[in-house]
Image (tube, rainbow, N blue to C red):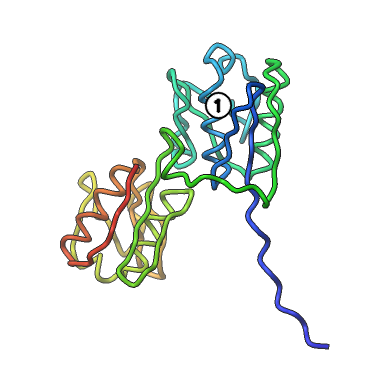
């Protein structure tokens, strides 16, 4: 009997309904999670006792080791967004129960989520569109940056000799923190700030005449 190809499971979305009827449901769970926390008063956030990766979920000082996962939720608080949709749903349920907020929290692939670029106030978005129709826009902006450089071509980008913070963007051996190995003999320096990722992509776009459309919100 011929084995049928496996179908990729539909992406689950997180939906949060407030007691007043307001609904938050974006196309990725992180955006919904962050926007929900922004609507909870900072006094309550200060009392959240949830831990993630052996560290408080919410902090005044972003954790350097999770810099790509830290998101600003307002009033000086940052949340570690590491983990999947069910982790985020569980964390919101705990917070809702602790402070008796009365949130209805659901996870389903059937929800129609708003696009992050159009709706999630303050959630950082980096999206790169290529002339051939390819669009790269991952939830993690480091992944967007890395995949964009891969598509442009590691060798082409390396030949530009670009620097970030006085460090080479691409090296033949690991030299700094924040580098990712992108092939057998190439290491890519990924900036921590999304604005710096966007800036470097714009410089590469101009220098190589690529005609990219780079969206940064």
Horizontal side of residue 99 vs 55, given as left or right: right
Quadrant for the N terminus, please. Answer: bottom right
Q: Number of labelled discs? A: 1
Measured along the vertical axis of the image, is residue 182 above or below residue 139?
below
Give 22 or 205, whichever is nearer the viewer: 22
For the point 62% across and 33% down, which residue is it? 52
Furthest residue toward top: 43
Give 134 or 65, whichever is nearer the viewer: 134
Measured along the vertical axis of the image, is residue 96 above or below residue 158?
above
Horizontal side of residue 57 vs 132, given as left or right: right
**Residue 184 lies in quadrant:** bottom left
For the point 63% across and 46% down, which residue is it? 13
Give 11 or 65, whichever is nearer the viewer: 11
Furthest residue toward right: 1
Measured along the vertical axis of the image, is residue 14 above or below residue 150?
above
**Residue 128 lies in quadrant:** bottom left
The percent coordinates of residue 104 (x first, y second) are 71, 30
Furthest residue toward front: 21
The percent coordinates of residue 144 (x first, y second) are 41, 55
The percent coordinates of residue 136 (x first, y second) are 41, 60
The percent coordinates of residue 130 (x first, y second) are 32, 66
Give 8 or 17, whichever is nearer the viewer: 17
Residue at the spot of label 1: 37
């Amino acid at each position: 009997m011929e084995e049928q190809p496996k179908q990729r499971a539909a992406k689950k979305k997180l939906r949060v309904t407030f007691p007043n009827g307001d609904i938050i449901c974006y196309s990725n769970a992180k955006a919904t999670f962050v926007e929900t926390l922004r609507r909870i008063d900072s006094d309550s956030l200060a009392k959240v006792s949830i831990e993630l990766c052996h560290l408080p979920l919410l902090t005044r000082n972003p954790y350097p080791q999770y810099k790509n996962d830290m998101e600003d939720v307002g009033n000086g608080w940052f949340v570690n967004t590491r983990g999947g949709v069910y982790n985020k749903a569980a964390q919101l349920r705990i917070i809702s129960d602790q402070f008796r907020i009365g949130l209805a929290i659901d996870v389903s692939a059937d929800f129609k989520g708003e696009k992050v670029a159009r709706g999630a106030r303050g959630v950082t978005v980096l999206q790169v569109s290529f002339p051939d129709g390819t669009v790269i826009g991952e939830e993690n902006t480091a992944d967007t940056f890395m995949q964009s450089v891969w598509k442009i071509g590691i060798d082409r980008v390396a030949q530009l000799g670009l620097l970030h913070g006085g460090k080479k963007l691409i090296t033949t051996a690991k030299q700094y923190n924040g580098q990712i190995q992108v092939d057998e003999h190439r290491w890519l320096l990924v900036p921590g700030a999304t604005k710096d990722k966007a800036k470097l992509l714009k410089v590469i776009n101009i220098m190589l005449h690529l005609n990219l459309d780079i969206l940064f919100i």
